[in-house]
Image (cartoon, rainbow, N blue to C red):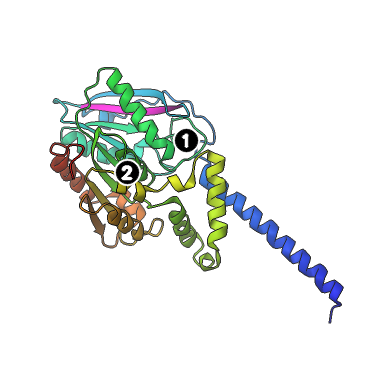
Amino acid sequence: MPAPRTLLIWSVRALGAMGVMWAGGTVTVAYAVAHSPNGSTASAGNDPCPSELSSHGRAEAENFTVGSRPTAISTWRVEPETAARGTIVLLHGVRLDKHSMLPAARAFLDAGYRVLLLDLRGHGRSGGGYLTYGVDDAGDVTGVLDALESRGVTLGPVGVHGFSYGAATALERAASDPRVRAVVAVASFASLRGVARDYVRWQLPAFEPAVPDLWLDSAVDLGALWAGFDADAAAPAHAAARTQVPVLIVHGSDDPQVSADNARAIARSAPGRAKLLLLPGETHASVLADGRGEIRKASTRWFDDHLFRFRPGQN
């Protein structure tokens, strides 16, 4: 049997190794939380609107420097062939860009809406080296809308359609911008802390039960500190509770990345204003693909039904 001194040395070494692993894992997760796909400020510009949109109407590729931490945001704006009925803002998911929203944009153009697609900060051709999970992104959306109005663009009633990270941004924006009359939130998370747990469960299912909340919260807090925002502010369910506008919440029942519990939590936070559309058997990837066009049709009906009759202050 080892001497007590030897046992003490081994115990200290083991604790030290565990501490290094804890710290190293925390930094790794924090980096993944905070850093954008761009890694650094992108060269906004030279991103012409694709022909599949420009063939539907007059297209403009524009960049706007906006936000509380000014960042260049790359946008496409397409006017329908007839007078626009209103404006639909389309917001993509994390580590994607505005190209991923093209099928939905075409559907809204065909329905007579102006469409505005953004590369959220840190994505695509927009600047920014960090992710903020809707906290800064919501202000960027408002900044772009303000800039368009200052140029004489009559927006009309505004709807926001977002997927995942973009859906979280849509909910945050609807809570504080009176121009937004309706939202479609597809596969949104309810809180950054909660979805971090979902991601661990998805990526490391065998180890997830052993991952303590304290460690995961520490990693999220460090990532948010790195990126310059408050992790507790990245909470779309809380934003939905503050908003007065009608919200359609769409989610796949079998989503392994952002569990359907997130959608249920958002719906519970906005009783009387939120409608939950849970799609059996669908996943995170399949609701983005929307192969049968079911979500595009439901979204168009939602905006048709709500953009023109809702006014801020209504219940």
Q: Residue at x 39, y 56 (%)?
A: 258
- In space, the residues marked 2 and 1 are separated at their CA atoms by 19 Å
Q: Residue at x 31, y 53 (%)?
A: 266
Q: Note whether 220 is above or below 281 in the view shown.
A: above
Q: Position of residue 98 (x, y in %)?
A: 36, 36
Q: Amino acid at mark 1?
A: Gly
Label 2 vs 1, first from the N-terminus: 1
Figure quadrant of the N terminus: bottom right
Start-end of magenta stretch? 71-79
Q: Residue at x 60, y 50 (%)?
A: 28
Residue 171: image tag: 2
Q: Is residue 66 magenta?
A: no
At numbered mark 2, what does the secondary structure look like: helix, strand or loop?
A: helix
Q: Could you say which is closer to the camera, residue 87 or residue 59?
A: 87
Instruction: Specify the principal SS of the magenta part.
Output: strand
Q: Which residue is mark 1?
A: 122
Q: Amino acid at mark 2?
A: Leu
Q: Note whether 201 is above or below 247 in the view shown.
A: below
Local crowd size for mark 2, using a 10 Å CA cut-off: few (<14), some (14–19), many (≥20) = many
Q: Position of residue 130 (x, y in %)?
A: 51, 38
Q: Is residue 14 left or right of residue 27?
A: right
